[in-house]
Image (tube, grey):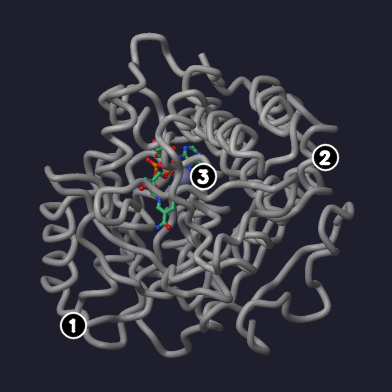
Amino acid sequence: MGMGTGGPAGAGGPAGAGEPAGAAGEFALHGARIIVRAGALADAAALVRDCAPGCRPIVIADANVAPLHAAPIAAALGTDLLTFPAGEASKVRARWAALTDELLARQLGRDTVVVAVGGGVCGDLAGFVAATYLRGVPVMQIPTSLVAMIDAAIGGKTGVDTPHGKNLVGAFHQPALVLIDPLALRTLPADHRRAGMAEVIKHGVIADEPYFHWIAAHGAALLSPIVADEVAQRLVLGSVAVKVHIVAGDEREGGRRRILNFGHTIGHAVEHLSNYDVLHGDAVAIGMVAEARLGELAGWTLPGLADEIRDLCATLGLPVRIPSAFDAETILSLTRGDKKARAGVAEYALPLRLGEMNVGEGRYALRMDEGLVRAAIEATR
Ligand SMILES: NC(=O)c1ccc[n+]([C@@H]2O[C@H](COP(=O)([O-])OP(=O)(O)OC[C@H]3O[C@@H](n4cnc5c(N)ncnc54)[C@H](O)[C@@H]3O)[C@@H](O)[C@H]2O)c1
Ligand SMILES: [Zn+2]
């Protein structure tokens, strides 16, 4: 990682992996200033102005988040708030076109700054509007769901879904500012809190063993909306630090960034097979258990890791078994058609032990014998 691309910036950087961190954190990543601080939303307008002096901000949020968190920010900025219906169904080209037309109708120019306040749907959609408006204007991400705070808002991927699949049309567009206030999670519905915890656990497994143990020590208490401010902050900060450090060295996913795919090869197949009835986070939990088992069967992963991941996921209310109706052959065939597959061969990011992934000739993507995958699937029933 180069200087200034991904390290903690400023004195308030996060504590080393897993240390209890009461302090706020700030990072610099590919031109993005990333701030994690309990209570930061109250200063959002000032920080937006600070980051883009003289620009004309426009705020975009879904209909749930608009009254809760976005309206006060738009009011403080003295600007309009554009809203759209909440949910994945809004992450489509028609909605991208409608929002773009709203900007055009306001005759907003190249001094526009899009401020996306909300979950990953809003971040991806509004980010894609910003990426393409007048060939690109800056975006600021103010994530309010756990998934958006620790995953979607960091890394610069934006885009929309198509009838052919999710996230198939989009652009890399790094935000100028990512403002993360863990206290916004207080209003997040319980199922979305749980789903986000799967990616949090993943971050512990792939890069931060002490963080994994910290999560395990707090267990189900982390699901409470009234968890102490410093615990909420530590939770978000630990995960943001992992994602930032991984993306810092690999902006467009050529190498180490692939370790973020742990649990996602079998996870995506399960998600797909359920017709998206199984939530992404739930599918990732199942996928992590199955893929850790696969690593164990291949003799790479420290025996016992799959059980350890399974137990922590179960403690947090995440599913850990592949439904018996999902047959192994169908899962295998879906993994061959996964976005990550190359020439029809599935690839896996597999752990060696907590905090350490298999490098696999620098590609962090391993091709596995399908007999072993089948056995791992059956062992995850
Ligand atoms: N760009 C990336 O790198 C990346 C990474 C991971 C996920 N994603 C995308 O993110 C999306 C999933 O994100 P998500 O889970 O945040 O979905 P989401 O944006 O639909 O948010 C989930 C629900 O929570 C509500 N919500 C959000 N914050 C809230 C709050 N503080 N209080 C009350 N309600 C709140 C939303 O209105 C919505 O109903 C998917 O489309 C996925 O593809 C993108
Ligand atoms: Zn995921």
Sequence-first disc among 2 and 3? 3
Q: Is residue 117 left or right of residue 182?
A: left
Q: Report the residue marked by disc 2.
A: 213
Q: Count the labels in the image.
A: 3
**Residue 38 is at least partly visible in this image:** no
Q: Report the residue marked by disc 1.
A: 134
User: Image quadrant of residue 300?
Assistant: top right
Query: Residue 62: x percent and y percent?
Result: 33, 46
Q: In terms of secondary structure, where does tag 2 sit?
A: helix
Q: In terms of secondary structure, where does tag 1 sit?
A: helix
Q: Residue at x 81, y 72 (%)?
A: 12
Neighbour tally class for label 2: few under 14, some 14-19, many 20 plus, Cα within 10 Å: some
Neighbour tally class for label 3: few under 14, some 14-19, many 20 plus, Cα within 10 Å: many
Sequence-first disc among 3 and 1? 1
Above/below status of 73 relative to 192: below
Per the model, the C-alpha gap separating discs 2 and 3 is 23 Å
Q: Is residue 58 left or right of residue 215?
A: left
Above/below status of 24 relative to 358: below
Query: Residue 170: x percent and y percent?
Result: 25, 64
**Mark carried by residue 210:** none
Q: Residue at x 38, y 57 (%)?
A: 123
**Mark carried by residue 145:** 3
Instruction: Tell which tag, 2 or 1, sits nearer the viewer.
Output: 2
The front one of 333 and 78 is 333
